[in-house]
Image (cartoon, coloured by chain):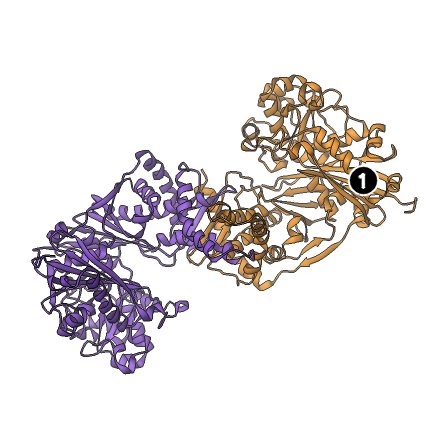
Chain colours: A orange, B purple
């Protein structure tokens, strides 16, 4: 490898593991990649699934990050280490943790090493349901600013303030010791660069704007008055958090000696401001003005960027969030999504697996069970793909895990209607696929009703790579082409684009996208005839949804 | 066996087979029984399931009736033959067939021996959907009597006139040769007694009143004017059918020499007027005033008898039929039912069997498949029985085969709402069981809203014998005890009671019921606490049903 090459590293902290990809900043060639699982998390430590408590130890992040860099450099050749110019990091979120005055997560202190409340509270931890309800109630009734309004008007138990308040109430020792709080995506760059002072470390615009009710119009976080009314435990905390926030093109600093050593890199490496995985995923998918990027997996995250409005900002109703610069600097980043997408099919698969796993029929070997689970969705897809659209058939509702957008409501549930004695597994599966596509359509409609035009759709995630039937039905229902990104790791690639920009190799994130982007491996083109038929089924889906929401949801 | 014994035979023609039970008329002791399958039907001859065409050859009835009597007498001892005093017959219905002037079913003539249109059109044959719609339209609009009004206000494609009109339109040769038409339950007694003249053979009140729009207030069948308007092909047919009808306590005659010989009995044996299986089943279940008898199998038939009203007859809205003497002579017999009951569970079982039968997982032996199918509902029942009632859980609608009562509507379909990612097979099964019980409750409510009090419930059929979980949920939902009849063949037993009455061994059917009835093997007693919880779920079921009917059914 030539010494003149400029390489960048994208680091993607997922729910279970951390992945690194090292790419050539000139053309985006993916030179090396590796994955490392979090050791404590893998053993289920500090979690209590029955109570929706999911905590991650900061040592899991530190140890696995060190290990994955070693593995990646071994895979790619140690000589590439000297050519790495920048590192950027994305994480899940909102995943906040309490820190002391030096910015150390409390779980790194001897006293707190086994205390789950001193660890990072993972995005999917739902222990703060009551606190979220209180925040929503106060925001609507206290007479001042409704701080939830740029986050879709409904604050979630998965987010920053809900979790902080829950932990502060729950744990007096953590309350005493917690000087401030950091998001996982803020703490890793701070750690790598040694800039961990909680009063000055560079906070991600993405995390602040989408999850912490930060907005420029009210000069940062919600007022101390609001927070104190919510709970006196929060009094004064605002001052120990932040007012400024930063987009992903901004450098935080360079690698500290300790971390240059631990990762096997030099102290010249620039560390960029972090962001959430979905948002760097959108960057990696080459999002641009008025393009929709859909991250399609167990759930979906649907993101667009638009020009910043002139004058007063227009609010998009019922969308998770709209934040200046949360995806691309200088543009408004908007986020929506479906609480369950692949999870809807997984639910049906598990239902159909029930007899194999529960009936006393004996002699079904483990390998047959795995084979059945493995074949289920492909075989259902193949059978469903041969059925003509049935306009008098089954209509399903995809809310098995509630509804995220439009108009978040976690109490909503899924449905199957139009069932007859002839409704077999492929027909029900088809209806579920149609329903998840209808949920996508509803989001696009809402964006457009609110004036955010969508000129194209790009997909990343597991489903676009594995499920042509689901993708084709989605394209037919949306009546728009869907382009699938070539790279297998669009999220880490987006972090690499941010790293290249933060390191000054490109003027803008847009330029980095152009150079590093992988392009698209295929396009699903809608069938106009089917689109018309789906339009009629969609009307029934909307009717059914309205009934379930208005009449059946207590 | 003593020569002084008086025995009677009940003959029950089901969908697939004919069963005979010979009982001691003094105490109902079941002395012998046997079953014989219809040979042509078993081979699928003359049927076309894809088009819902189901026809039965009269030779199937004749040959299997002869064989089953031989078998029964062999099993019970030939010496009982001389003690048999009466025979009564029940059949499925409406199952009409065309006959010539001598009352011979056309399929018995050489020319028609292989013509399905010259055979009996089985109850579940749905080829006459269009004709049923025409009958309903004309009945509501022609300005004269609405002849459907004692049959629930909606005429079915399964019934007498729909089927006759369909065959007459379809088949010119049958049209030419058909002098008159007979129900299966009328033809067998006619055949046995030799009284086959279609102008004088004794017609069953049950079949006439419930399926042929016969009513005393309009002096029999619908007017020639109505029938001719429906289709000129029907002109004059009314005169070649009947005006008088007879209840099950009336004798038709005695066995002809030919049939005494074929059955191995004497020509002294009295042959009673026939009826449908459900109605003689209600007799066999010891139905009495304001008791509800539920025949619970793939579908249900729910019957009550009430005192005849004084003065003008009150109409029970949306019930399949109300006919003076159709169950017990001298009382008003009312019939309601659910189009799918056990079929709802069978649908779910088939859905869950799909992977075992369709995935390419190899090495699953036939015996494991049968074992799985056999265990499915018992294991689901056992798991579901351990779940507490979930008031925020799944609500299902049991209309997978349309809705028979109240207010027949075959276009309605089933539903499952309240589905979450945790909705597993036992939870869905429980919701289906609750939904079928809610469907039963709706029927009882309608009876009571219309002034027909229900003072108790008796169950017969496959489900009461095999499914304690389903029976207990039904009792809890209905908040009433349900008594299960001891006899395994309540229907044939009811025919035997009718035979004993027709033969003069008892003054009335009621007396025969008292003497011959088997009594009850157990009672399902409702849990008042659960009944209260189900009351709240039932409200949601009603709401869901209203939505599906008003908004989703095109």
Residue B485 shown left or right of residue A341 in the figure: left
Identify the residue under disc 1.
A499
Residue at 15% across, 58% down: B498
Measured as percent of width and height from the top left, residue B319 is found at 26, 54
Residue A124 or B446: which is nearer the viewer?
A124
Quarter of image, res A129: top right
Q: Nearer the viewer, residue B354 or B135?
A: B354
* Image coordinates for residue B191, horizontal then vertical, percent: 18, 72
In this image, B297 relative to A451: left or right? left
Q: Is residue A134 left or right of residue A333?
A: left
Q: Is residue B406 visible?
A: no
Quadrant housing residue A120:
top right
Label 1 element class: helix
Measuring from the top left, give residue B309's x and y in whole percent.
14, 52
Q: Nearer the viewer, residue B476 or B394?
A: B476
Provide the chain ID for the residue under circle 1.
A
Task: Give the vertical position of A115 relative to B386 (above or below).
Answer: above
């Amino acid at each position: 490898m030539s010494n003149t090459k400029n390489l960048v590293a994208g680091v993607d902290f997922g729910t279970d593991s951390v992945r690194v990809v090292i790419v050539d900043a000139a053309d985006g060639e993916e030179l090396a990649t590796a994955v490392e699982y979090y050791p404590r998390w893998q053993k289920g430590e500090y979690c209590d699934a029955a109570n929706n408590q999911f905590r991650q130890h900061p040592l899991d992040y530190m140890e696995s990050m060190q290990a994955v860099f070693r593995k990646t450099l071994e895979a790619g050749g140690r000589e590439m280490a000297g050519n790495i110019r920048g590192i950027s990091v994305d994480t899940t979120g909102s995943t906040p943790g309490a820190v002391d005055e030096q910015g150390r997560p409390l779980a790194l202190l001897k006293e707190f090493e086994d205390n789950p409340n001193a660890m990072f509270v993972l995005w999917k931890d739902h222990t703060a349901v009551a606190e979220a309800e209180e925040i929503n109630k106060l925001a609507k009734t206290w007479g001042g600013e409704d701080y939830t309004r740029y986050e879709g008007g409904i604050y979630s138990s998965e987010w920053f303030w809900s979790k902080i308040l829950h932990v502060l109430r729950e744990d007096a020792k953590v309350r005493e010791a917690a000087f401030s709080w950091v998001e996982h995506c803020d703490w890793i760059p701070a750690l790598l660069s040694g800039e961990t002072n909680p009063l000055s470390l560079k906070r991600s615009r993405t995390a602040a704007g989408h999850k912490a009710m930060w907005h420029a119009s009210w000069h940062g976080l919600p007022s101390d008055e609001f927070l104190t009314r919510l709970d006196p435990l929060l009094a004064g905390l605002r001052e120990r958090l932040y007012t400024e926030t930063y987009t992903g093109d901004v450098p935080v600093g360079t690698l500290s000696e300790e971390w240059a050593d631990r990762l096997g890199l030099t102290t010249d490496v620039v560390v960029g401001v972090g962001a959430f995985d979905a948002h760097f995923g959108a960057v990696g998918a080459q999002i641009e003005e008025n393009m929709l990027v859909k991250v399609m997996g167990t759930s979906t995250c649907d993101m667009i960027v638009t020009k910043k409005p002139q004058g007063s900002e227009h609010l998009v109703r019922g969308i998770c969030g709209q934040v200046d610069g949360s995806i691309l600097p200088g543009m408004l980043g908007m986020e929506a999504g479906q609480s369950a997408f692949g999870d809807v099919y997984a639910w049906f698969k598990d239902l159909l697996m029930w007899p194999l796993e529960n009936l006393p029929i004996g002699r079904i070997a483990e390998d047959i069970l795995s084979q059945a689970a493995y074949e289920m969705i492909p075989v259902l897809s193949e059978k469903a793909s041969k059925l003509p659209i049935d306009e008098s058939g089954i209509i399903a509702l995809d809310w098995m895990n509630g509804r995220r957008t439009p108009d978040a409501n976690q109490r909503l549930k899924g449905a199957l209607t139009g069932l007859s004695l002839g409704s077999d597994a492929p027909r029900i599966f088809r209806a579920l696929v149609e329903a998840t596509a209808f949920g996508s359509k509803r989001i696009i409609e809402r964006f457009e009703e609110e004036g955010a035009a969508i000129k194209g759709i790009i997909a990343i995630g597991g489903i676009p790579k594995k499920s042509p039937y689901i993708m084709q039905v989605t394209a037919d229902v949306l009546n728009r082409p869907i382009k699938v990104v070539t790279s297998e790791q669009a999220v880490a690639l987006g972090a690499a684009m941010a790293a290249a920009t933060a390191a000054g190799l490109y003027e803008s994130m847009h330029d980095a996208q152009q150079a590093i982007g992988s392009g698209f491996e295929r396009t699903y083109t809608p069938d106009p005839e089917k689109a018309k038929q789906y339009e009629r089924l969609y009307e029934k889906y909307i009717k059914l949804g309205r009934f379930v929401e208005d009449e059946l949801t207590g």
